[in-house]
Amino acid sequence: MKINRNINTTIITDDNKGVIRELTGEVIISNLEELKTINTNFIVFNDALRELSQREKETFFNNMEERNVNFVNITSNLEEALYAHELIIIKDGKIILQGSTISVLKEEKILKRLGYKLPFIVDLSLQLNAYGIIDSIFLDEELLVNKLW
C-alpha cells in the first residue's frame, strides 16, 4: 500500500493490524496525550479518535491542519472520513475504493454492501442530489444548510 504523505488520509478497514504492518517506520500513537510530546509533521492514528465527541474531533482536526501536520487515520468509523482529503476502503486486506473523500463516499451502494452506513450529511446530500434539489455533495452540515437557504 502506498500512502500519499502530502495529504490527510483516512483508511476505513476491518483489519487495523494489517494496515499498521504496512505503515511500519512511521510514528504510531495510541494515546492522544502523546501528541504533546511528539514533534513531527506526519502521524498515524489507529482508532485513537473514536472516544472523542464530534466537537472534539472538529477541534482536533482543525488543530492538525493549523499545525501543518499530515496524518493517516485508521478507523472503522466512516464519520471520521469527513475530515480527510483522501479515503481508502480496505476489506480483507484488499483496497476496495480509493480516492478523494467525496468520490469514495459517492460509491454508496458499494459502501452499504460492505456494511458501512454513510454519514448523515453525505446521505442527505446524495438524496437531495438525486432529486435535483442540489448539485453537489456536502461534507459539512453548515455549508449544506446555507446552500438550501
Image (tube, helix red, strand yellow):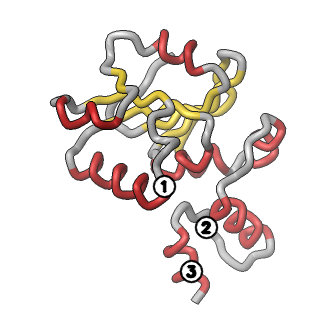
Identify the residue position indicated by label 3 in the image: 145
Residue under pointer 1: 53
Above or below — where is 89 with respect to 82? above
1 on left or right of 30: right
Q: Mark 2: few, some, or many residues within 10 Å (few <14, many ≥20)?
A: some
Which corner quadrant of the image does residue 23 belong to? top left
Q: Viewer-nearest of labels 1 and 3?
A: 1
Which numbered dot is residue 136? Answer: 2
The one of 137 and 113 positioned closer to us in this rendering = 113
* Residue at the (64%, 23%) spot, across then down: 95
Which element type, helix, strand or loop, lies under badge 1? loop
Along the line of sight, the residue nearer the viewer: 57 or 24: 57
Q: Residue at x 49, y 58 (%)?
A: 54
Does label 2 or label 1 sit earlier along the sequence?
1
Under mark 3, the amino acid is Val
- The CA distance from mark 1 to mark 3 is 22 Å
Residue located at (36% from left, 21% from top):
28
Are the residues tagged 2 and 3 within 8 Å (C-beta)? no
> Identity of the amino acid at label 1?
Ser
Q: Residues within 10 Å of mark 1 (few under 14, many from 20)?
A: few
Residue at point 52% right, 82% down?
146
Residue 8 coordinates in the image, percent (x, y): 39, 39
- At mark 2, the secondary structure is loop
